[in-house]
Image (cartoon, rainbow, N blue to C red):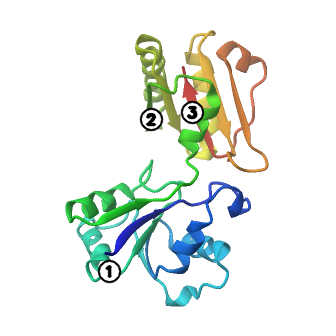
Amino acid sequence: MARLFLVPNLISDCNWQSVLPYNVKNILGNTSFYVVENIRTARRFIKKVNSETDIDKLTFFELNKHTDPTEITKFLVPVEQGMDVAVISEAGSPGVADPGAEIVKIAHQKGYQVVPLVGPSSILMALMASGLNGQNFAFNGYLPVNRKERIKAITELERRAFKVKQTQIFIETPYRNNALLADILASCSPVTLLCIAAGITGEDEFIATKTIDEWKRVTPDLHKRPAVFLIG
């Protein structure tokens, strides 16, 4: 029976064997159909893991915010015909903070086997390393771009973190990280704990949990660095 594989991608420029299990290479070496968020970077990733792959013989379907929802079902036609399909995202683990969840939902509706492979998720790895509550947490995605609305969202997340003792996790587009951090430091209580996890799995990996007051004394430069923020 053909399967839909959820193939983890790298989240930093590193040796793939240091963060991915070897069976990822086997899956990529035996799969010809791919649903990807970005074809160019997916091709580069496949070639990095298995240099012997003939990229030109592979078929790619692009799934991102520009994809027509009515087209997604067609991406699973190879599975219906008995051939495996692999999903590769830009977020590390497909389906987590990623449009890949849409095709996974359709696969379940059609009764296809969905196989998740072990790989890095910056969200979960940040939580693991934060020292904050890992029993009760929520991922909130991106906060509003409008500063007034963003500050309101930060205040609400802090309130929720204290009220129900639930770690609040969120992210931002890398070039807006410093603006987000400035708003967090200006909006939250001095005793609130904030974890900043940047460049996870990379050589410049930086993960630290401090109070807001402590962060104000030494504020890191996060400009254009992939980062995850956690309040607890």
Q: Quadrant of the C terminus?
A: top right
Q: Which residue is mark 3?
A: 127
Kindly tell me whether residue 138 is visible in this rendering: yes
**Secondary structure beneath disc 3?**
helix
Look at label 3 and name its amino acid: Leu
Q: Is residue 172 above or below residue 159?
A: below
Q: Position of residue 113 (x, y in %)?
A: 31, 64
Precedes in sequence: disc 2 or disc 3: 3
Q: As drawn, is 128 to the left or to the right of 7?
A: right
Could you say where residue 187 lies in the image, as x and y percent from the top left? 55, 17
Mark toward the start of the polypeptide (2 vs 1): 1
Give the residue at x 45% y 35%.
Answer: 139
Give the residue at mark 2.
139
Q: Amino acid at mark 2?
A: Phe
Distance Cα–Cα, label 3 vs label 1: 37 Å
Q: What kind of element bears circle 1?
A: helix
In the image, taking residue 45 as reference, residue 147 lies left or right, namely left
